[in-house]
Amino acid sequence: MTDPISRRQLVFLTLFAGSALAGEPQPKVNEKDSLSAALGYVSDAKRVDTKASPAYQAGSTCSNCSWYQGKAGDPAGGPCTFFPGKSVDANGWCRMWNKKQ
Ligand code: SF4
């Protein structure tokens, strides 16, 4: 006999695992978070504060950064090593930008 609570837990775990495997979009990084502020992250590289981030190079975005794990130009963005559990914008930028080889 199956215990109803165990079955419920199993259903939850199955759904949770299913959504994780399906690559559910993660919440976008908030520019106002302390980590974003520390790294100078903006969701649109056109808005980089070049005085605060003089190393910024025109044309650099998350899409062409080596730390970006999403698809280039994907409107949903993608994961970044520096923002675990969140999605950065494909057109975003931060001071950790490193040219994708
Ligand atoms: S490290 Fe790269 S991918 Fe991550 S936020 Fe900064 S520029 Fe974007």
Image (tube, grey):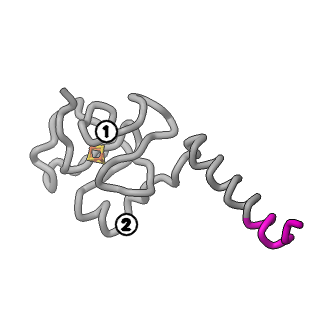
The extreme front residue here reads 1
**Could you tell me residue 37's position as x and y percent?**
28, 63
Looking at the image, residue 17 sits to the left or right of residue 73; the answer is right
Q: Which mark is residue 54?
A: none
Seen from the viewer's position, the closer of residues 23 and 39 is 23
Mark found first going from the N terminus, 2 or 1: 2
**Residue in the picture at 81% in, 73% down:** 5
Looking at the image, residue 61 sits to the left or right of residue 72; the answer is left
Seen from the viewer's position, the closer of residues 16 and 4 is 4
Instruction: Classify 10 Å Cα crowding around label 2: few (below 14), some (14-19), many (20 and above).
Output: few
**Could you tell me residue 78's position as x and y percent?**
43, 41
**Predominant SS of the magenta segment:** helix
Seen from the viewer's position, the closer of residues 24 and 61 is 24
**Residue in the picture at 36% in, 42% down:** 44
**Could you tell me residue 69's position as x and y percent?**
36, 38
Looking at the picture, which amino acid does disc 2 mark? Asp
Quadrant in which ligand 1 is drawn: top left
Q: Which part of the image, by quadrant, shows the N terminus?
A: bottom right
Residue pointed to by mark 1: 62
Q: Is residue 2 magenta?
A: yes
Q: Which residues are magenta?
A: 1-9
Q: Is residue 3 magenta?
A: yes
Q: Which part of the image, by quadrant, shows the C terminus?
A: top left
**Could you tell me residue 14's position as x and y percent?**
69, 53
Q: Determine if the C-beta at disc 1 is less than 8 A from ligand 1.
A: yes
In what element is the residue under mark 1?
helix
Instruction: Classify 10 Å Cα crowding around label 1: few (below 14), some (14-19), many (20 and above).
Output: many
Looking at the image, residue 82 sits to the left or right of residue 85; the answer is left
Residue pointed to by mark 2: 33
